[in-house]
């Protein structure tokens, strides 16, 4: 795996690097300053980030939120001396939260969790597979021809995620606007929606995907038949794809995530009693 480690203490970086090498992970890049690490990750691919929380300038939770805006998902593991941040860590879909001082066994567990997450989050293009592959577990991401799609506009990405969430059904514009913009002024919200839709189509047009989004008077939908999506595969029976989070960045997805979590817990309980 390609691993980035971020900690403002050089000694902590050294210890972590040594332990990772002992566990067979040598492809690591280390940073003491969050800004430098973020700049690196914006142009270089990484699979896993080991992240401290208490750092000057930008704490680890905020750094993780910035990571979630990248086109390519990155696995996050927190290493912290402060247990009180654990709940916030799960809010940014970290796969593990390890308290300092830690040992090699804890790091090995985190690496195993990261590998499992990566197996489900980076779909490979198979012969004859659809060009567009979408991920909803745990956060939203899109691949076109095997390459991550970068969004220059955050709301354009959220609009596409919402249409994926609606499974290709026609969505009334008023309902969509309320989900994405809340109780904003109606006229201003509709104008903003048109701008966001235009930006989304502009991002898709160079890829020959301008017809991926279909709109008619007062409604809009995703052409579901043109995409492959882990959420749709889950609904068709691949329940192992859900690892505890669904469209983690969006409040409007919380109800579905709660239902998916309840289903997962019920299956786990049935497995223990069966």
Image (cartoon, rainbow, N blue to C red):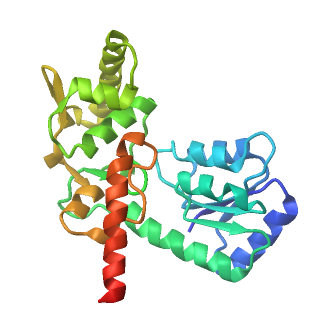
Compare residues 151 and 40 and report the one nearer the observer: 151
Taking the image as drawn, is residue 123 in sight?
Answer: no
Quarter of the image with the N terminus is: bottom right
x and y, in percent, of residue 268 in the image = 36, 78
Looking at this view, is 4 or 191 the one in front? 191
Image position of 255 with respect to 244: above or below: above
Residue at x-position 38% and y-position 13%: 185
- In this view of the protein, which residue sits in the foreground, 164 or 186? 186
| Residue at 72% from the left image edge and 46% from the top image edge | 59
Give the total of numbered labels: 0
**118 w.r.t. 51: above or below:** below
Q: Can you give x and y, in whole percent of width and height, for residue 115 in the image?
A: 49, 72
Instruction: Determine the residue positioned at 27% across, 45% down.
Output: 165
Quarter of the image for residue 171 reads top left
Q: Position of residue 272 (x, y in %)?
A: 37, 86
| Location of residue 225 with respect to 196 vertically, above or below | below
* Lateral position of residue 235 relative to residue 137, left or right: left
């Amino acid at each position: 795996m390609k691993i980035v480690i971020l900690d403002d203490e050089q000694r902590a970086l050294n210890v972590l690097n040594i332990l990772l090498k002992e566990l067979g992970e040598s492809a690591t890049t280390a940073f003491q300053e969050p800004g430098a690490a973020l700049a690196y990750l914006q142009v270089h691919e990484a699979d896993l980030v080991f992240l401290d929380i208490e750092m000057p300038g930008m704490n680890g939770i905020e750094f993780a939120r910035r990571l979630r805006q990248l086109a390519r998902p990155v696995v996050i593991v927190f290493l912290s001396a402060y247990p009180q941040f654990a709940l916030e860590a799960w809010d940014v879909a970290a796969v593990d939260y390890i308290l300092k001082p830690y040992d090699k066994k804890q790091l090995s567990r985190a690496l195993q969790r990261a590998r499992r997450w990566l197996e489900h989050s980076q779909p490979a293009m198979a012969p004859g597979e659809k060009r567009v592959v979408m991920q909803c577990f745990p956060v939203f991401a899109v691949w076109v021809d095997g390459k991550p799609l970068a969004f220059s506009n955050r709301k354009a990405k959220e609009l596409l995620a919402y249409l994926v969430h609606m499974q290709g059904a026609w969505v009334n514009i008023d309902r969509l606007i309320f989900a994405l913009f809340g109780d904003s002024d109606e006229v201003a919200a509709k104008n903003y929606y048109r701008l966001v839709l235009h930006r989304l189509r502009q991002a898709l047009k160079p890829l020959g995907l301008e017809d991926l989004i279909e709109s008619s008077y007062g409604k809009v939908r995703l052409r579901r038949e043109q995409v492959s999506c882990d959420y749709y595969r889950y609904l068709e029976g691949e329940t192992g794809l859900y690892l505890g989070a669904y469209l983690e960045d969006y409040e409007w997805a919380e109800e579905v995530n709660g239902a998916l979590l309840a289903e997962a817990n019920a299956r786990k309980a049935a497995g223990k009693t069966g």
